[in-house]
Amino acid sequence: MDILEYINSAEKKIKKELKKVDEVVFFNSKKVLDAFHKEGVSEYHFNSTTGYGYNDLGRDVIEKVYSDIFKSEDALVRGQFISGTHALCVTLFGLLRPNDIMLSICGTPYDTLHEVIGIVKNSSSLKEFGVKYEEINLINNDFDYEKIIDRVSKKDLKIIYIQRSKGYSTRKSISIEKLENIIRKIRNVNKDVIIVVDNCYCEFVTTKEPIEVGADICVGSLIKNLGGGITPNGAYIVGKRDLINLVGQRLTVPGEGKEVGPTLNMNKPLLQGLFFAPSVVGSALKTAILTSFVLEDKGYLVEPKYNEDRVDIVQNIIFNNKEDLIRYTQGIQMGSPIDSKAIPVPSDMPGYDDKVIMAAGTFTQGSSIELSCDGPIREPFIAYQQGALTYEYGKLGLIKAIEKLEEKCEKTN
Ligand SMILES: *Cc1c(COP(=O)(O)O)cnc(C)c1O
């Protein structure tokens, strides 16, 4: 059977799952549109400021729209954030003081945070400023409730850090229900600890977001889900007003905080990206579901499976050998709109401990709401695939990746 026929017949078997995605897309589209209506988003909000960025009406309305969507008291949505990691770094430096303790309850955080926290030595890390770090690992893909409650009861913690998406680990991502459950348990014994959530890759995958289930502050990148493939850079932070104020003082300067920050023609792409985001996240989810079904059908281990509830847009394919990981990733690059002739190879990346291979034939550098695939070159050689601006392009990318993956079989047969 030719590959397109094969993919089309696979598609027929995942109809129910694709339909469920459409329902979430509709719900979140309404959430976005309601926020635009409530805040009266107008054409004049597309204007932007330069220099200090005083009185930027577009910036203010964007932050109100984000607050409505996340049901938070306040928001900081800025192009001055270089990345999700930068926003997480500013959040942690904004909230933590010398001798404070930060506890991660999902094990070790995402690779790029190791030098921020000081897990990997860096003379500018939180650790060098006297911030203490502890972690509790997940057990069986869930929180270690007993250990966490025991530790939290001592009431000497400043921050509890929860990373929802799995990053480059083999664990499952943390659902909103699990998040709600652990926050309720923490609040029973400790009202004051600040609960920080890394929400990268999880926005609009389901109908609820972390602040709605009790998180104090929540962070994510705009070149992932909420940028809808249109916002060219930046990150968002939403949460309690006093916390957002502290983080704003750290992002700019004490005394100016959120009041400054020029938007440099970013307001329209920020709003338009958010407007597209529910539907683009839907395309990414459909592409992930199709990928999961097809690769499992071809005998590979996948996580999550096509019919499992999803928490984020990431699809893992566990290759168990380096060559397949490399070939598949190269195939994703070949199926990309940009730099399709480039051949990705494993290389050292700033912020990552192992060599990493990355396919990113994207309009925006490093954007992973666009179809992209990456993985550290370490056992069990897992591809982390995510994104697709449209489902059709996602499907075409998958076809190329499978063709490239199966090249070796044809050659040896
Ligand atoms: C992508 C991501 C980040 C931030 O990464 P950037 O590339 O710096 O935007 C942080 N945590 C998780 C879980 C992520 O997936």
Image: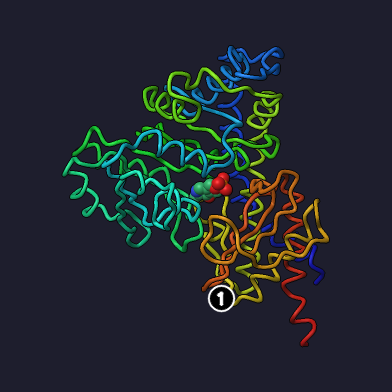
> What residue do we see at 72% from left, 60% from top?
332
For numbered disc 1, what is the local secondary structure?
loop
Q: Is residue 248 left or right of residue 334?
A: left
Q: Where is residue 69 in the image (x, y as percent from the top left)?
A: 51, 27
Q: Where is residue 406 in the image (x, y as percent from the top left)?
A: 74, 75
Question: Which residue in the protein does label 1 denote?
Answer: 320
Q: Residue 77: which quarter of the image?
A: top right
Quadrant where the image shows the N terminus: bottom right
Quadrant where the image shows the C terminus: bottom right
Q: Residue 59: which quarter of the image?
A: top right
Looking at this view, is 309 or 35 the one in front?
A: 35
Circle 1: residue type: Asn
Q: In the orientation shown, which residue stands out farthest toward the front? A: 123
- Visible residue check, residue 311: no
> What residue do we see at 47% from left, 53% from top?
110
Looking at this view, is 218 or 404 the one in front?
A: 218
Q: Residue 330: which quarter of the image?
A: bottom right
307 relative to 152, above or below: below
Q: In this view, does 287 lie to the left or right of 240?
A: right
- Total numbered circles: 1
Q: Where is residue 291 in the image (x, y as percent from the top left)?
A: 65, 60
Q: Position of residue 67 (x, y in %)?
A: 49, 24
> What residue do we see at 62% from left, 60% from top?
374
Q: In this view, does 392 lie to the left or right of 67?
A: right
317 relative to 65, above or below: below
- Visible residue check, residue 254: yes
Q: Looking at the image, what colour scheme do you see?
A: rainbow
Looking at this view, is 216 or 254 the one in front?
A: 254
Q: In the orientation shown, which residue stands out farthest toward the bottom? A: 413
267 relative to 97, above or below: above
